[in-house]
Image (cartoon, grey):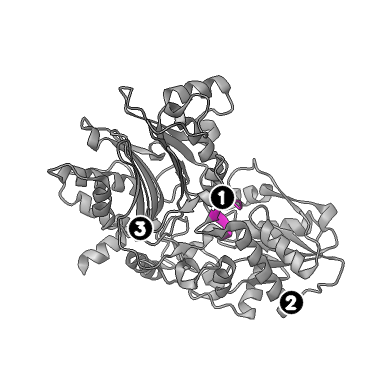
Amino acid sequence: MSELHHECGVAAIYHLSGRGRSPMCTDEGPRQISRLLPRMLLDIQNRGQLAAGMSTYDPDRAKLLHTRKDVGTVTEVFRLNHRAKCESLMRGLAGRAAIGHVRYATCGQDDRSYAQPFQRDHIHKRKWFSFCFNGQLANYGVLKERLLADGDHHLTLDTDTEIILHEIGRVLSHSTERIEWIDVLRQVAADFDGAYSLALLTAEGEMIVARDPLGIKPMCYVQEGPLFAAASESVALLNLGFETDQIKSLPPGHAIIVSPESGFRMEQFAPVDKPAHCFFEWIYFANVASTLDDRSVYLSRTRLGEELARGERELGRVPLDDPDTIIVPVPDTSKAAADAMAYELSIPCREGLIRNRYAGRTFIEGGRARKVKAATKYTPLREVMEGKRIILVEDSIVRSTTMNVLLDRIREVGGAKEIHVRVACPPIVAPCFYGIDMSTIDQLIGPKYFGTEGELTDEAQQRLADDLGADSLRYLPVEALARAIELPADHLCRACVTGKYPTTCGQHLYQIALDNRGNKIDSGRTYEQLAAALSEQ
């Protein structure tokens, strides 16, 4: 799964005045609760390493909202490895409320202007706000065309984040009377099709944290006394010092509003039918220490390993009682599944691959350079693998570049005599239009072997194994996902493995992607085609 780009992450914290002092405060006190925000962002850094930023609110300074953001990791952006520079930044950003973001781009360029939060300055405090979000709007192209239709508007960035910024601004500008923020959210979200969790902070000191009506993207929160905190993953709240039972998942279609006057309240802002949680959160994206929607990421991954073990016994391809048979996980997110599989089968699980965490991301260059990067990402240990029959456990195979190179290195450098790949996920056969960077069918390896419906035949799996250089290869069936996560199948978004999308525009985009198959049309063009298609209806 190292070929798959990460999502983004959102965090927020607020300490209300006049309601006591939270024990979570640093020595600087409630007025500088913003100092906790970089720590929270560090805990969700797994969701994006391209850029980071935060906005803070302080009613006692001229710059009521102050934003710092840049390309780089959380440590780089906030100079966490330089005490004096970090302290200077934290003093300048000091506030009793803060929102923050870590970014990986699914649309937009890799420069500072795309880093979040996005701030909208205004002379009226009511219309001065900053916000950040995790997700992607499937109808981004439609909203963009509508916004530009009158010729009076201009967009400087190619991202749905700017669209959301302007949509919020439009509602505020068109309101003749003071409008509550929950009503702003209701009006804006009524036109959204897609996935999002967002945090917004205003120059009047109001904070809004919201989650899309399908709950595709996660959002966790905790409220204790005068302190409110929220993050894309529970681990960021757990590491602040909150107890596990204090941390809750925000219900889909709901928002939490924090106000200096009225405190905390939760309201529903969009109609809610049934959820469509992204299954990839449990399989790959989320920190293994997180719990999302009352389901442990770690336990879900161990159950995936149990599913693999069950399938291995039924298959009977690999001799399980041979001392030369070992299980090796592809670091890092496959480890829990590999350990559970090994335990069920009573086979040793060995760390035969050492990940070079400083090799860089494999998607930066294409072609030959990508293969070179993939080769430097993992070092096979010959001491572990030589002469062994390896059951290699991986999260998923998306584009195959890394897996192809990795198998060659396991044979050549590791000296393995056999390699049997076991994938703790069904084949990825359809694009994602909700925030994962795989939005064309041609960039996926799955459809070439299993069609667009992911039909798992023995022949197709063996053909892929042969082409990758493995002795055998097996995926988990789609039904295993719901069993492992312990949620009903119809409460999960499994579009990328089934081709069935939980939103109307998602399904439209998929049909366009099917029509574009083989035409080398990029994902941006797909979204433009959606706008054109809908305008003709």
Q: Which residue is mark 2?
A: 313
Q: Is residue 135 above or below residue 483?
A: above
Q: Is residue 126 magenta?
A: no
Q: Nearer the viewer, residue 337 or 323?
A: 337
Asked if residue 353 can be seen in this view, the reply is yes
Say which mark, if any, is on residue 287: none
Q: Which residues are magenta?
A: 283-291
Q: Secondary structure at mark 2?
A: helix
Spot occupied by residue 248 in the image (x, y as percentages of width and height): 48, 53
- Nearer the observer: mark 3 or 2; the answer is 3
Task: Give the residue furthest to the left.
Answer: 176
Q: Which residue is mark 1?
A: 244
- Nearer the observer: mark 2 or 1; the answer is 1
Q: Is residue 425 left or right of residue 520?
A: right
Whole-number angstrom distance, CA of label 3 to CA of label 1: 23 Å
Q: Secondary structure at mark 1?
A: helix
Q: Which residue is mark 3?
A: 253
Which of marks 1 and 2 precedes in the sequence? 1
The residue depicted at 75 percent of the width and 79 percent of the height is: 316
